[in-house]
Amino acid sequence: MKIENDLGKDDIKRLVIRIAIPSMLAQFVNVLYSVVDRMYIGNIAEIGEKALAGVGVCGPIVTMISAFASLVGIGGSPLMSIKMGEGSEKEAKKILANSFLMLAVISVITTAGALLLKNNLLMWFGASETIFPYANQYITIYLLGTIFALMAVGMNQFIICQGFAKVGMKSVTLGAIINIILDPVFIFVLEMGVRGAALATVLSQMASCAFVLLFLFSKKVPIRISFGGYEWRIIRKITVLGMTPFLIIAFDNVLIITLNAALQHYGGAEGDKLLTCATIVQSFMLMVTMPLGGITGGTEPILGYNFGARRTDRVIRAQKYIACFALVFTSVMFIASQTLPHYFVRIFTHNEEYISLTVWAIRIYTVGIIPLALQYVVVDGFTGMGVASVAIF
């Protein structure tokens, strides 16, 4: 059994680089799921801007669904890393089994609940009568693939936490490539429009899910998915630790929902236009926050494993390198956001009025992203070590 990274013995600096870079790239590629969808949708003839606003309204619902993947994946994988560091493979195996069960149950409940409430949710989140049909078309198909989305994202964390960062990146890359290929086929060739974008996303998530589960059921990993050993004690621990990323995503969603509702309510006749611009701004912010989370979240196994092994010297050194890496990334993205945003915006629309407003908004929205790196380092660092009370605070 070949391990990519020995979390307890490899040089810390090289270990951080070898895990942080693939994790960052994996999340960058993951952004393509939403960015590519929105890019093609924004370029649909005649209805592009309206359809893009509709998909933007779906954003909070999609994000909240992914929050449950973080609840289990980021809640369970650090605990598993700690147990592996302690040399307790039996407990690590139980954590993986319980996490798999939790994601399966949550997928069913979330799908049913969201499908029942979707019409009301879309209207509450800012959908006007004009853009509601596009939002409804997209979210209905997307919700049918909830289990694939949750499994692909949530269980991928248990690949990374065992030292297989490159494999974790491959699972995300596979889905992104399939999505990029299928989007234009379904949207333009088959003339499915917004429905085509949603279907392409679901099929790509299905492929990523299959890749992740096949790997975790195989003999290529030290700890494989098993059945049995389900305990409320373990489920509670996973939930408590995973509540940190879950709440962060939930509060971010409240911000986006409030912003969309305010733009629609106070924007008057230009409400849909403002929503379209806000959707592009939020897409740019994903280019910052998701790769940043890849750096700090992807390196959690290093912290968890060495914390479990009582190697505090390695934990402290790792955090220093992670912080430096994260600060360099946010500094680069700050420069890009202030000098190059028009190139990004033109991917979505060629309407000069939309471009001008969105570029202005991106420059303002990203003024404070450099210190954001330190927040991510602290929150994900304590999460990785299983210290939920500090991470949540």
Image (cartoon, helix red, strand yellow):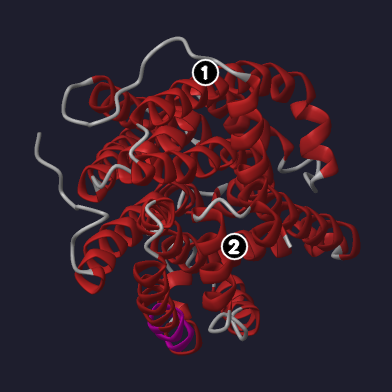
Residue nearest the observer in this picture, 101 or 349: 101
Q: Is residue 64 visible?
A: yes
Residue for badge 1: 101
Q: Residue at x 53, y 60 (%)?
A: 380
Is residue 326 shown left or right of residue 110? left
Is the residue under label 2 in contact with that under label 1 (CB below 8 Å)?
A: no
Is residue 85 shown left or right of residue 62? left
Is residue 11 shown left or right of residue 363? left
Residue nearest the observer in this picture, 382 or 63: 382
Query: Is residue 332 located in the magenta-colored stretch of the structure?
Result: yes
Distance between mark 1 and mark 2 Cα atoms: 32 Å
Vertical side of 91 occupied by 18: above or below: below
Which label belongs to residue 282?
2
In the picture, residue 358 is in which quadrant? bottom right
Residue type at the position of mark 1: Leu
Residue 305: % across, % down? 37, 51
Residue type at the position of mark 2: Gln
